[in-house]
Image (cartoon, helix red, strand yellow):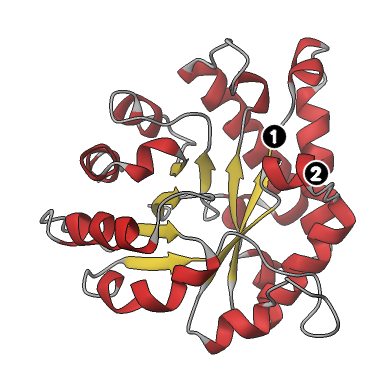
Amino acid sequence: MRQQIAAANWKMNLTLSEGEQLVKALVHAGIVLKKHQRVLMGVPFPYLVPLQAAVQRVEGFDLMAQNCAATNNGAYTGEVSATMLKSLGIQWTIIGHSERREYQLEGNAVLAQKADRLLENGLKPVFCCGEPLQIREANTHNGYVETQIRESLFHLDEKAMSHVVIAYEPIWAIGTGKTASTEQAQEMHRYIRSVLEKQYGTTLADTIPVLYGGSVKANNASELFGQPDVDGGLVGGASLVADDFTAIIRSLKA
């Protein structure tokens, strides 16, 4: 079975004290993960060191950075590099989140550079892709998402690509009043896997986790994660509530 992942993205939320309380609640929730299951905690940069020891008390739990720079060092005030993250023992990093694409205008070319920096430092990218409302309504979403993946990742060889996780975000269904159905989630995940198959072959495509990032909640996680090509979720708001995120973790495919 492919690796099944519950990935929390705290974004710019919680004080350190609140974050410590949240992690403490998760650690004491009695979660026992199977070998193919993993929990990633995408916390703000300042919290990576103080939360590290607590997260590592549970087998299968890891901290994750929410972003990294496209270069390893230099005069880039406010940036954090993959080299720095490696020095902290961080193994996972989100890149290409829809909010960074929109607010920081990150394009496919710079995300290709970020993927390279992470992989050459031994970190695993959680690469986000997804289409906005106008693209979905124009029925050009498949090609749009395929272009994001091709231009950012398909320069990688098979060995490097095997370390990548993909997270699909239906941006059109976030904050628009529209809802993505479970069937729509599965349809896009299946299409993403077909794109990977065309480039790398069935064997590799079948091993790459594809997470769903469209408002995963405690009450819909089981249905979403039960789809054949949905391998867990990249979870925003629900990951800030211990009981909700615990329920989401328990919904991973066994």
Is residue 13 among the parts visible in the rendering?
Answer: yes
Circles 1 and 2: CB distance less than 8 Å?
yes
Relative horizontal placement of residue 227, taking residue 81 as reference (left or right): left
Above or below, 166 against 147 in this view is below
Q: Residues within 10 Å of mark 2 (few under 14, many from 20)?
A: many
Q: Residue furthest bottom?
A: 87
Residue name at image x 27 percent, y 60 percent: 23
Q: Nearer the viewer, residue 238 or 192?
A: 238
The amino acid on which the numbered mark 1 sits, given as a three-letter code, is Gly
Residue name at image x 28 percent, y 24 percent: 219
Q: Residues within 10 Å of mark 1 (few under 14, many from 20)?
A: many
Relative horizontal placement of residue 36, taking residue 200 as reference (left or right): left
Q: Quadrant of residue 221?
A: top left
Which residue carries the number 1 mark? 130
Which residue carries the number 2 mark? 148
Point out residue 238 in the picture as x, y percentages from the top left corner.
Answer: 37, 37
Residue name at image x 81 percent, y 77 percent: 71
Q: Nearer the viewer, residue 14 or 51?
A: 14
Above or below, 217 against 18 in this view is above
Point out residue 231 in the picture as x, y percentages from the top left corner.
Answer: 44, 43
Above or below, 44 against 51 in this view is above
The amino acid on which the numbered mark 2 sits, given as a three-letter code, is Gln
The mark tally for this picture is: 2
Q: Nearer the viewer, residue 226 or 216?
A: 216
Is residue 157 among the parts visible in the rendering?
Answer: no
Cα separation between marks 1 and 2? 8 Å
Point out residue 25 in the picture as x, y percentages from the top left corner.
Answer: 18, 55
Callout 2: SS: helix
